[in-house]
Image (cartoon, rainbow, N blue to C red):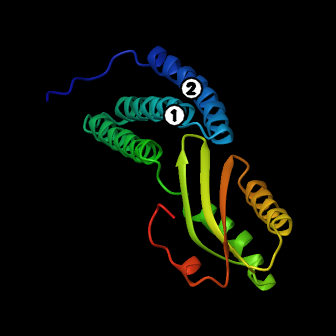
Amino acid sequence: LYPQPLAAVGVGLAISAVAAVINLVVGRILLLAGRQHRSITLEADAHHLLTDVWTSAGVIVGVGAVSLTGWLWLDPTLALLVAANIVWTGWRLLQRSINGLMDGSLPPEQHARVLAVLDRYRSQGIDYHALRSREAGARSFISVHILLPGTWTLARAHDLVEMIEREIRDTLPRATVFTHLEPREDPTSHQDLGLDR
């Protein structure tokens, strides 16, 4: 409440700058590893270090600006901006963590890639429905009902489904794909009655 003038800030700023650079390098490495391995834990650690970088940058800019200008209100103002960044980063991490814990569905971009694979087969008279997806940690799980001509042999249907599953796994390498075959001619095959089908 009662700001005091700063004294001898050079050494403190230098130490903060070195620590910020180290945290920036380690944070970027952790962030890349977290994204590569789809690990929310590594990404959370990375964001923790990166918020430390923003905190250090805020301290350096705030202390430097106050020592140059004498405007004591700059330091707490920058501290509030840094705090807002920390809260925002924490909120985003919390949302992602909850989605992972609750087995949330695939992100829209990944869901669109699955649809693109399935839609390519529609031109061959193959249809699908009851597409469901979820994420659990680094894994994705996809379930879909494939509608085929009832006259197909089991071997032919199996070969096609293997091809579809492989294409989905090619576009989402950490996906486990479950398919259920149904004859296209059966009216009940087109109904999504619930998760038990």
Q: Residue 56 at x, y = what percent? A: 45, 29
Q: What residue would you read off at disc 1?
A: 50
Instruction: Please give left or right for residue 128 compared with residue 59 in the image.
Output: right
Using a 10 Å C-alpha cutoff, classify the residue at mark 2 as few (fewer than 14 neighbours), some (14 to 19) or many (20 or more).
many
Q: What residue would you read off at disc 2?
A: 23
Q: Badges 2 and 1: C-beta atoms under 8 Å apart?
A: yes
Q: How many marks?
A: 2
Q: Residue 186 at x, y = what percent? A: 62, 82
Helix, strand or loop status at disc 1: helix
* Quadrant placement of the N terminus: top left
Quarter where residue 179 is shown: bottom right
Q: Residue 57 at x, y = what percent? A: 47, 33
Question: Earlier along the polypeptide chain: callout 2 or callout 1?
Answer: 2
Instruction: Please give left or right for residue 38 compared with residue 71 in the image.
Output: right
Using a 10 Å C-alpha cutoff, classify the residue at mark 1 as few (fewer than 14 neighbours), some (14 to 19) or many (20 or more).
many
Return the residue nearer the eye: 181 or 162. Answer: 181
157 over 10 or under it: above or below = below
152 over 144 or under it: above or below = below
Q: What residue sits 73% from the left and 49% below the top?
A: 173
Quarter where residue 12 is shown: top left
Q: CA distance from mark 2 to mark 1?
A: 7 Å
Return the residue nearer the eye: 96 or 120. Answer: 120
| Dot 2 amino acid type | Asn
| Dot 1 amino acid type | Leu
Helix, strand or loop status at disc 2: helix
Taking the view exactly as shown, the residue that stands out farthest to the left is 1
